[in-house]
Image (cartoon, grey):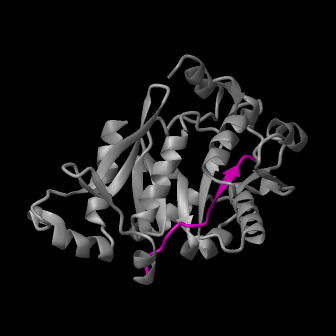
Amino acid sequence: MKNKILHIARELRKSQTPAEKLLWANLRNRKLEGYKFIRQHPIPFNYSGEQEQFYIADFYCAEKKLVVEVDGELASDGGESNVGESAILILAAGSSSRLGQSKQLLQYQGQSLLQRTASIACAISQHVVVVLGSNFDNHAKEIANRSAHVVNNQDWQKGMGCSLKVGVKEILSRWPTTKAITVLVCDQPRLTEQHLKLLIECAANNAQAIACSSYGSTLGVPALFKKEMFTFLQQTGDNEGAKKLIQQHPEQVVSIPFDGGEIDIDTPEDLNKLDTGY
């Protein structure tokens, strides 16, 4: 986890906002009263079990235990995108034909994969939409006690892109002022709240319109799309998905590592790997 945080901090230093650059010019080399400041400094802020949680401060002075944050209105006035009002979209409409059983209902760490993903999303945002389709009634029951809004995509067989468009439409109908949408799938068992928090923070501190996850040799979901990408999301082909947009707009992409993101459940072999702790 610590190596992952340090990687993100280094990436943030490469893409400072105009406000951050201005302040850094006046802080670096002990220019302020002789005090030393560090840019994009990871600070542990609490502990969940044995997992350390971090907050990346814009500027930090250890001598004074002082944190300086300069994002927000100043960055927005300069035309920077922000993710102030963001929603989460979970795509879980498929029939798991290659697996031979519902991946949404597979148990992992005491919950079904669908329950687990919905719980993580609802812990991060109050604006969560889950798109279901195949086996709708059974899947909807799994998350009936979650605060997520469930949508039934009756055309789910057309492909993931169809569900993506249905979900985006629902989000913008419910919350028209949404400025960012994070797209998830339910078959990434290594997903954590911490990863989503880091993804949102990465997006907030970078000008690029897409913040996605890197794992294996690929870029993919979870992926956050800022408002300027909504039109592209709504024009996605039925058989395409969020990954296609990431590939089509490389200049708009920033990424963070996702340990275990390559582990998904598409076949019985994948399920066996999960059962054996792979």
Is residue 180 in the magenta section? Answer: no
Q: Is residue 203 above or below residue 265?
A: below
Residue 141: x and y, percent?
86, 38
Q: Is residue 232 above or below residue 133?
A: below
Q: Which residue is pictured at 31% across the width and 75% down the height?
A: 19
Residue 10: x and y, percent?
27, 54
Q: Decide which of 126, 278 is in the foreground and name it.
A: 126
Left or right: 148, with 65 as reference point: right
Tell me the magenta residue range: 79-92
Number of numbered callouts drawn: 0
Q: Which residue is pictured at 68% across the width and 40% down the height?
A: 119
Question: For residue 193, which quarter of the picture?
Answer: top right
Question: For residue 22, which quarter of the picture?
Answer: bottom left
- The reply to whether residue 202 is visible in this rendering is yes
Q: Decide which of 180, 26 is in the foreground and name it.
A: 26
Which quarter of the rendering shows the N terminus?
A: top left
Left or right: 23, with 131 as reference point: left
Residue 177: x and y, percent?
66, 74
Residue 92: x and y, percent?
73, 46
Question: For residue 180, which quarter of the picture?
Answer: bottom right
